[in-house]
């Protein structure tokens, strides 16, 4: 969970992130999330954590080119108004260990 927050913060520092819009995923439908991603290439989605008072963030991307210099494209999900697990794509840094190992 802390890793997601750290990755979101790093993503927000990059020059591409400064022009990104942020949206509350729980106030959108899953199709609206995908439509917004296709329009803007990448957006920040925020949603409530399982811990009261904390928000989680994902930088979603529409294609792997949005991840250049920020890891590789990976699957994730966020809660939306119509689906508890709306599938999205995000950038994930490789660790060099386990399934994220660079080959």
Image (cartoon, rainbow, N blue to C red):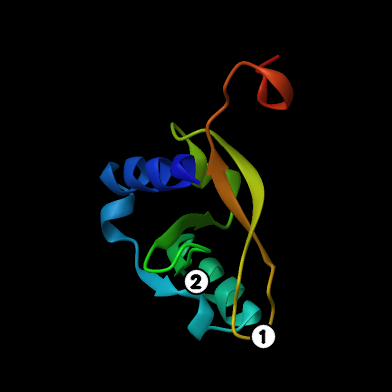
In the figure, 98 relative to 35: above or below? above
- Indicate the position of residue 66 as horizontal and vertical percent values: 49, 46
Circle 2 packing at 10 Å, graded few (<14), some (14-19), many (20+), is few
**Quadrant of residue 56 within the rendered picture:** bottom left
**98 left or right of 46 in image:** right
Tag 1 residue:
82
**23 left or right of 89 in image:** left
- Indicate the position of residue 97 as horizontal and vertical percent values: 65, 17
In the figure, 16 relative to 33: above or below? above
- Indicate the position of residue 30 as horizontal and vertical percent values: 64, 78
Give residue 2's mark: none
- Indicate the position of residue 83 as horizontal and vertical percent values: 69, 78
How far apart are labels 1 and 2 at the CA level?
21 Å
User: For this rendering, which residue is in front, 18 or 100?
Assistant: 100
In the figure, 23 relative to 69: above or below? below
**74 left or right of 56 in image:** right
Q: Residue furthest front?
A: 52
**Quadrant of residue 86 within the rendered picture:** bottom right
Tag 2 residue:
39
Circle 1 packing at 10 Å, graded few (<14), some (14-19), many (20+), is few
Q: Which of the two discs, 1 and 2, sits closer to the camera?
A: 1
User: For this rendering, which residue is in front, 56 or 43?
Assistant: 56
Q: Secondary structure at mark 2?
A: helix
């Amino acid at each position: 969970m802390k890793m997601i927050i750290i990755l979101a913060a790093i993503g927000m520092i990059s020059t591409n992130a400064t022009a990104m819009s942020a949206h509350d995923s729980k106030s959108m439908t899953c199709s609206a999330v995908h439509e917004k991603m296709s329009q803007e290439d990448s957006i920040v989605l925020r949603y409530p954590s399982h811990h009261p008072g904390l928000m989680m963030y994902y930088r979603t991307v529409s294609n792997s080119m949005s991840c250049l210099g920020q890891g590789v494209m990976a699957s994730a999900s966020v809660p939306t108004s119509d689906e508890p697990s709306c599938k999205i794509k995000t950038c994930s840094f490789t660790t060099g260990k386990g399934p994220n190992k660079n080959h």
